[in-house]
Each structure stands twice: as C-alpha cells, then as structure tokens.
Amino acid sequence: MPKTSVDKLVEHTFSNGQIAKILKVAAGTDYEQALSLAGLQGPTPTLLVIGGASHMSDESQTKLLQFFNGTLATLSARVGLTVLDGGTDAGVIHMMGQARHHVDGQFNLVGVAPLSRVIFPIGSPPPQTANDQMYPPVELEPHHTHFFLVPGEDWGSESRWLARFSSVLAGHFPSMTILINGGQVSLKDLRLNLELGRQVTIIAGSGRLADAIAGTISGLTPSDDETIQNLVDVYYPSQLSVFDILSSPLDDLKAQLDLYFDC
C-alpha cells in the first residue's frame, strides 16, 4: 500500500451518535504534530490499555467486564484521564469503548491502529494488501473520540505511536499501562512502554501473555520465552506489578489506581 504523504483529518459520526476525529497520519509526521492536528493537548494523566481477549475463560471475561465498566471507566471519568488503546472493535478495546458508554464518560478515548488493518468509515476502502486474506481489516470501535491511523501494513506498526503518544500527552502527569491477556504484538507494546519508563500493571488471570509474565514473576510457571524473562529481570519490581483479577477483590485494584493517580 502506498504511504500516506499528507496528514488528513476527518470527523465521522458513528451510528450511535459519537463524533470522532480520525487522522490519517502521514509518514514523517512526528508525535507532537499528530496530536496537535487532532486537537489533543497535554499535559494530562494517561492510561494505556494493551492486550487482547483471545482464549479467555468465561470467569475472566466476567471479571474484566466488571473492571472496565466499574473501576476503569469510573476512574477515567472522575480523574479526566486520556485513555489510549488499539482502537478496533474487538477484545479489550471493545470492552473499553463499551465501558466509556456505560458510564456516559466524557474523557478522551484514543485509538491508534495501522491504516491498512482497519476499515476506514468514510469514502472508498484502501487498496488491498497481501495480508488482507489472512488478517481482514477490522471495524473501528464506535465509542472512541479520536483515532490515529498510522503508516504500516502489519499489526505492531502502531506500537511505538501508542507508547510515545502516552508519554507526550502525560508530560509530568502520571501515566500507566495495563496489560490484559495479549500476544506477540502486546509483548512489543510492553517492551516499548517499559523502555520509556512507564509503570505497567499486569492483569493476571486474563490469560496468554499476562499470565506468562505473572507466572515468571512469581516463579510458579516461568516462561521459556527469553524476552519475557529478560523484561522481568530488568523491570520487576521497579516498573512491573501484578494484580490477579480472579483471586483478588477489584476494590484492591481500584485503591491501587486511585493511589497512583492521586485521587
């Protein structure tokens, strides 16, 4: 697919009435410029949600829905967080969008995704790529307020944008990343966030990558993935913490988040 050569900002009204600003980010645009073009300014406390919901147990999904609709959305609305995620209408990103709607939240919810991997809601679809048969483009989640569609044909092209956007927007304000479930792209997200100095909370009990990291930290089921082992060795406990959503009260996590964001 040809690279975007000019930034293009459009406003789109989803069928639910939500108006979102959608920026097609040109190659060579820097993070501050992209945020400014979309009307986002800091400093503001930020929360980045990374991960997925594949192969998740029913119990985990139920607990996560309680976490998103209660703890996370309520905190975001009360503190005025800017929440960032992958922007697509699936998995934990879908949960985040629904949670904002559930509490009638007015906080900014920002999605970042590769342009080639999403269905652009206005005009003709982008040219097909070789990845489309294996990974068909997906819909944008319709409760977000902003989207950045960045250059790249593969999932993971958005990772550095998500990490950097969070840092630029936060400035001197608190910024945290929450990892739920997740796979190889989430591992890339995690590494970039840790390298930028961000605190990361791992939601154990959500499956896949999150459980692999939690098991490595506890030593009960250490991962044989060298990248995971290295991240734990370097960043735990200074930047990595674990919360088990299946065995611990959600009020405990709420208290931790309240303390971190000083509310």
Image (cartoon, grey):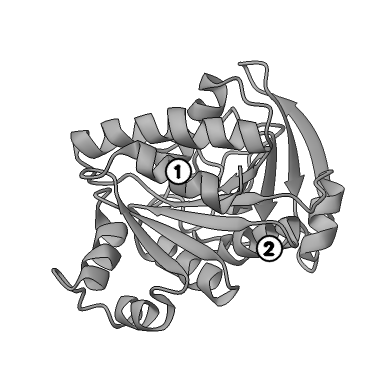
Would you identify the image quadrant in which residue 58 lies?
top left
Q: How far across and how far down the image is residue 33, in percent?
A: 85, 59
Q: Secondary structure at mark 2?
A: helix
Q: Nearer the viewer, residue 82 or 115?
A: 82
Q: Nearer the viewer, residue 234 or 256?
A: 256
Q: Is residue 186 left or right of residue 172?
A: left
Q: How far across and how far down the image is residue 84, in percent?
A: 60, 47
Q: CA distance from mark 2 to mark 1?
A: 23 Å
Residue 230, placed above or below residue 255: below
Observer able to see residue 165: yes
Q: State the quadrant of the C terminus.
A: top right
Residue 61, placed above or below residue 127: above
* Residue bearing the label numbered 2: 167
Q: Amino acid at mark 2?
A: Ser
Q: Which residue reaches farthest left?
A: 220
Q: State the quadrant of the N terminus.
A: bottom right
